[in-house]
Amino acid sequence: MKKVLITPRSYGKYNKEELIALFHKNDIEPIFNPYGRIMDEKEMIQEIKDVDGLIVGVDPVNSNVLKCAPKLKAVAKYGVGTDNIDCDYAAKNGISVTKTMNANSDAVADFTMALMLAVARRVVEIDAGCHSEDWSKKEALDIYGKKIGVLGLGAIGRGVVKRAKGFDMEVYGFDVFENVEYNKQNNIKFTDIDTIIKECDFISLHMPLVEETKYILNKNNLKNAKENLIIINTARGGLINEDDLYDMLVAKKIYGVGIDAFENEAVHDSKLLKLTNVIAGSHTAASSKGAINTMSKMATEHVIEDLLK
């Protein structure tokens, strides 16, 4: 019987029996994350050595891990970002890598807007004050009719564009590839990152983390930020230089950030967490019931299909 290691903690939360039955129907044994958290490299090496397939979240699947999995034939990403997977090594060694494309796009776009509203209107700060019997008025920023720059116009970025239009926002966009027809249809001002930083009130990140995008926002370009800029990152932590971001937040050069992805996940000592103008998430933007169901089923179907080839 083939074996599939499943690392995401939310996998099958609402449809686990259905998914296990699907595995068993195809003579496959699912093995679940024994740690109840994101695994480190050493733990991945230990757990992956005897499996044929892998369904993985953000746990490390680098070449060191893959070298220790001689039977591995299929990796199904529970999500869309594959920066934690050595796809080159996988391709060279006949290991298929699939993604659950668009399964969580709406959930992440929703959470992006929730963070944007929360930061701009100081929702967390006001709530904490009320729970401490501080009923003072706290001035905040508007969203309606403002300018937003969307960095990355894939499925999630386009979802944010659609939602931003509901707030009558003026949309600027940037991506590695320009889709002229889409931009024209949606009245997007496609431009460069420096222009977006100077012109926009909000910046929302939806890009993959690759060599070209690492620290795409940093002190050198953010020093030209428009007054009261708000940054939302529901993509990957390494897109922003967090030390630079901290300095600019403390200096009030940036109004606030909503950040659901840190460069080092499950961070314990980030300076950013000490700031009141930072609203943090635990890489949870995709964690809606609908998205979890869809990602779980899609990843399962992908890994079964590849193992049965």
Image (cartoon, rainbow, N blue to C red):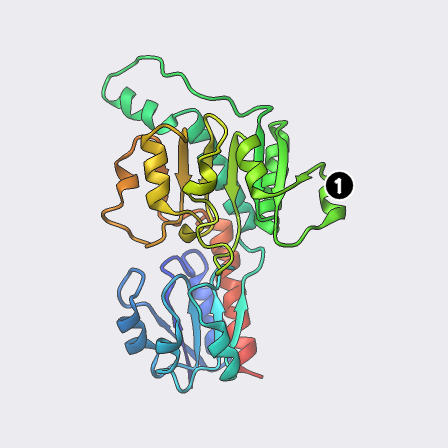
Q: Quadrant of the C terminus?
A: bottom right
The residue lying furthest to the top in this view is 136
**Could you say which is closer to the camera, residue 136 or residue 236?**
236
* Residue at numbered disc 1: 184
146 left or right of 232? right
Kindly tell me whether residue 280 is visible in this rendering: no
Q: Quadrant of residue 11?
A: bottom left
- In this rendering, the answer to whether 89 lies above or below 131 is below
Give the side of residue 288 with respect to residue 198, left or right.
Answer: left
Mark 1 secondary-structure assignment: helix
Q: Position of residue 278 (x, y in %)?
A: 35, 35
Q: Position of residue 255 (x, y in %)?
A: 41, 28
Q: How many marks?
A: 1
Type of the residue with mark 1: Lys
Picture quarter with the N terminus:
bottom left
- Image coordinates of residue 49 in percent, x first then y, are 34, 82
